Image (cartoon, helix red, strand yellow):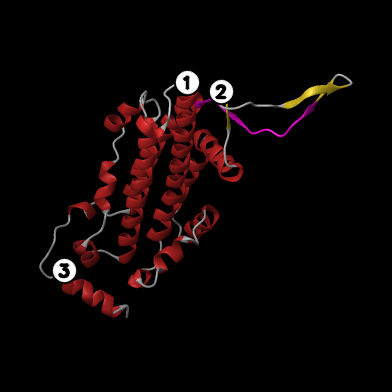
Amino acid sequence: MKVKDLYEEYPFDHWKEYDPYDPHYAHFKSYYIYTAFKIVDVYSSFAHARSYMNELNLEDYGQAISKHDEIHLKYIRAKTIQSALAFYNYCIDLSWQVVWFNISDDTFRFIENNEYDKYATKCDFDSLIFKLKIFKKEYLRNHLTRFKSSKLTENIRKKYNYLKHRGTFEFEGLGVIQKCSMASVNGVSLPFLRREEIDIKELETNLIEFDMLFVEYFNILIEMTMPANFTKIKMDLFDPLTIFKKYKECEII
């Protein structure tokens, strides 16, 4: 499948419809507000990832590169696909935070003094799975575990962690990839440090497959964590007063 076909066959624009506003704050539990807010964070990161993938095979990058020859095109594509790889992986971590907030306490105190962001930093996969086990949310735990343990997710995650800790990959045709010394001693070439080599086309194929997998996984995750009527609720004249009362109960105003 080509990247341009993903927009039609694997749409994700409906994720941004969860961005909470007045009626949500007035009529839903606080943990649904936090979950919805995080869903839109996933939407934003996923939009960046797919946008980078869509730009990968452009023939004209304008002023982004000084020449449109083979080496400059390979450079910009190497940079672009590494950005896509990073943003797809941000989506994985953010999807865990969706669940993390969904099983949080019903309190609007997270709105105070960056408490929302502080609580988000406490989320990692092991802590989340442990919490889900305590709360007996087996359906969520199984869904998260299946996605994380899939070979495709593990492969993408492994490449991202390498990029995060090593900074970059080696790309054929970009610079000299020297695997060993130019001269040999007693017929033995001496090994040098080297980076992992990446084939851009192969990684592109893997990321397209991951894109499709993530859309399916996250759509199900939203269904598991959010009320069906969340995106359908309408503004009410008394919503501001209802929100005020909720905040007053939490002593945040």
What whole-number distance in Å separates the C-alpha atoms at marks 3 and 1? 58 Å
In the displayed image of the protein, which residue is found farthest to the right?
Answer: 186
Q: Is residue 146 one of those drawn in magenta?
A: no
List the residue tagged with mark 2.
173
Residue located at (55% from left, 37% from top): 159
Q: Secondary structure at mark 2?
A: loop
Residue 53 seen in this snapshot? yes
Q: Position of residue 226 (x, y in %)?
A: 30, 54
Q: Is residue 147 above or below residue 28?
A: above
- Secondary structure, mark 1, is helix
For the record, the magenta segment spans: 190-200
Tally of marks: 3
- Mark 2 and mark 1 in contact (Cβ < 8 Å)? yes
Discs 3/1, front: 1
Q: What residue is pinned by disc 1?
A: 70
Quadrant for residue 62, please give it: top left
Farthest residue to the front: give it.
66
Q: Image quadrant of residue 244? A: bottom left
Q: Is residue 107 visible?
A: no
Q: Is residue 29 above or below residue 213?
A: below
Residue 177 in percent (x, y) is at 65, 26
What's the CA distance linking mark 1 and mark 2?
9 Å
Q: Quadrant of the C terminus?
A: bottom left
Q: Which residue is pictured at 23% across the width and 55% down the height?
A: 230
Instruction: Point out which mark residue 239 bears.
Output: 3
Give the left or right position of residue 199, taking residue 65 as reference.
right
Q: Residues within 10 Å of mark 3 (few under 14, many from 20)?
A: some
Q: What kind of residue is marked 2?
A: Gly
Q: Residue 28 in the image: state x and y as whole percent.
A: 25, 63
**Looking at the picture, which amino acid does disc 1 mark?**
Glu
- Mark 3 or mark 2, earlier in chain: 2
SS of the residue under disc 3: helix
